[in-house]
Image (spheres, rainbow, N blue to C red):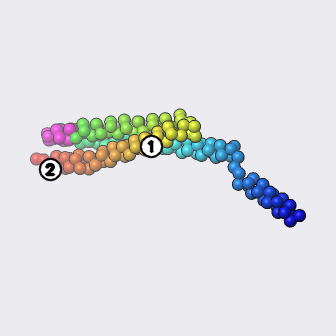
Amino acid sequence: MKKLTWLIATILFLILTSAAFATPREQVQTKIEDKCASIQAKIANKITKFDSSKEKHVSAYNNLKDRITKFIKKFDEKGYDTSKIKTDLTTLNGKIDKFTKDYSTYINKLRETQTLACGHSEGQFKDTLVEAKKLLKIVHQDASDIRKYYRTEIRKDMTDLKKQK
């Protein structure tokens, strides 16, 4: 009788504990889908944020170019030699063009992750996301190069030009 009671108690214990710890395949699939939806929402928010950020950057850079152009025009009228600043402006335009091109490439790579099915193409999704992160580093470096070029070259040349005559 004791053996039968222990056997029944053990079987009931195993049944109850295994049911509590078991995760049906549907629950796992639901968790994966929820995680993918969360990731896709984050990527969509990032794209929106960076699109508006790009507009701000390009607007600031265009404003900078306009101010430098006005400076050149003002000092040309006074008879100063502005050839060095004109060269700086051309270089700055090239840096800004590189920034906008790299920025567009980054945003397109992020949009590419949206077309991949998360959970089904895990390797491709992750690889594309890693590539996008690398492109973002390039974009940050481009913006840094523009700021650095303005501070170290253009400002110096403007100061030197003001000291002429």
Of residues 21 and 122, which is closer to you in this image? 21
Q: Residue at x 14, y 41 (%)?
A: 80
The image position of residue 141, as x and y in percent, is 34, 46
Front residue of this view, candidates 101 and 153:
101
Q: Residue 102, how many percent across, how many down?
A: 37, 38
Q: Looking at the image, can residue 67 be seen?
A: yes
Q: Is residue 16 above or below residue 49?
A: below
Q: Are marks 1 and 2 in contact (CB under 8 Å)?
A: no
Residues in magenta, as a range? 74-87
Tell me which amino acid carries mark 1.
Val
Amino acid marked by disc 2:
Lys
Position of 109 with respect to 27 (left or right) is: left
Examine the structure image and report whether residue 81 is included in the region drawn in magenta.
yes
Q: Residue at x 38, y 46 (%)?
A: 137
Rendered view: 51 above or below 23: above
Magenta span: chief secondary structure: helix
Q: CA distance from mark 1 to mark 2?
A: 49 Å
Q: Quadrant of residue 36?
A: top right
Assess disc 2: are there few (<14), some (14-19) or many (≥20) residues with their C-alpha within 10 Å of its C-alpha.
few
Most foreground residue, 79 or 60: 60
Position of residue 13 measured from the top left corner of the image (x, y, whole percent): 78, 59
The residue under the point 53% across, 40% down is 122
Percent coordinates x, y for residue 118 in the rendering = 56, 39
Residue 163's label in the rendered image is: 2
Q: Pointer 1: what residue?
A: 130
Quarter of the image with the N terminus is bottom right
